[in-house]
């Protein structure tokens, strides 16, 4: 596999925590992926908040430096995120998910790696297109 994929919080946490039910799928995907792994700082923040120990938070930052590119977001992304908050208010979306949608819309990256298949099955870009969840195939 090659290309660019957006990485959500769940696969990061799952990859680094053997007890996570998504661990094997995350390991399989990350070991086989040969393209760019992109994420946003809200995703990294959420992963750190979900980690139970300082050691786990440190592991996330070390793994990030070796494997992921945390992409910059701009003012246009903030406007997109606000629009998505309104559009999906009934879904109770989180900032991490919406930051990935905003980045996808701005850059054209359409592949995402997420354990939140239910949420991402509902989300649509302004073009009406859904993101393609690659974890479902891992």
Image (tube, rainbow, N blue to C red):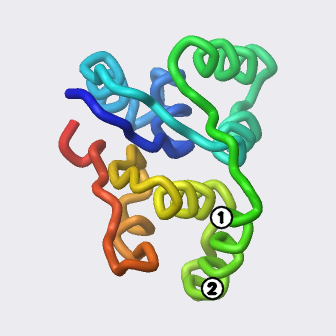
The label number, if any, that marks residue 105 in the structure image: none
- Determine which quarter of the picture holds residue 99: bottom right
Horizontal side of 98 relative to 123 (left or right) equals right
Total numbered labels: 2
Residue 135 higher or lower than 99, as above or below: above
At numbered mark 1, what does the secondary structure look like: helix, strand or loop? Answer: loop
Q: Please give the name of the residue rendered at 69% of the width and 42% of the height, measured from the top-left corner.
A: 72
Horizontal side of 138 relative to 74 (left or right) equals left
Horizontal side of 3 relative to 44 (left or right) equals left
Horizontal side of 48 relative to 37 (left or right) equals right
> Residue 107: where, in percent of width, then height?
48, 53
Q: Please give the name of the residue rendered at 56% of the width and 39% of the height, measured from the top-left corner.
A: 39
> Residue 136: where, in percent of width, then height?
24, 48
- Determine which quarter of the picture holds residue 122: bottom left
At numbered mark 2, what does the secondary structure look like: helix, strand or loop? Answer: helix
Label 2 vs label 1: CA separation? 10 Å
Q: Nearer the viewer, residue 104 or 121?
A: 104
Q: Nearer the viewer, residue 18 or 89?
A: 89
First in sequence, mark 2 or 1: give its number: 2
Q: Quadrant of the C terminus?
A: top left
Residue 66 higher or lower than 98, as above or below: above
Label 1 sits on residue: 94
Q: Please give the name of the residue rendered at 46% of the width and 21% of the height, measured from the top-left corner.
A: 18
Q: Please give the name of the residue rendered at 34% of the width and 61% of the height, measured from the top-left corner.
A: 131
Q: Quadrant of the N terminus?
A: top left
Label 2 sits on residue: 89
- Determine which quarter of the picture holds residue 47: top right
> Residue 111: where, in percent of width, then height?
33, 49
| Residue density around tag 1, few if under 14, some if 14–19, many if 20 or more, within 10 Å | some
């Amino acid at each position: 596999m090659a290309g660019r994929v957006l990485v959500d919080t769940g696969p990061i946490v799952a990859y680094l925590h053997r007890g996570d039910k998504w661990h094997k799928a995350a390991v399989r995907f990350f070991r086989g992926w040969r393209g760019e792994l992109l994420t946003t700082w809200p995703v990294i923040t959420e992963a750190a908040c979900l980690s139970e120990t300082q050691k786990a938070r440190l592991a996330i930052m070390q793994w990030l430096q070796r494997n992921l590119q945390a992409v910059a977001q701009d003012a246009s992304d903030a406007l997109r995120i606000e629009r998505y908050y309104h559009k999906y208010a009934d879904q109770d979306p989180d900032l991490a998910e919406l930051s990935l949608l905003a980045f996808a819309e701005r850059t054209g990256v359409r592949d995402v790696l997420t354990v939140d298949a239910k949420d991402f099955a509902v989300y649509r870009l302004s073009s009406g297109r859904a993101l393609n969840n690659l974890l479902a195939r891992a």
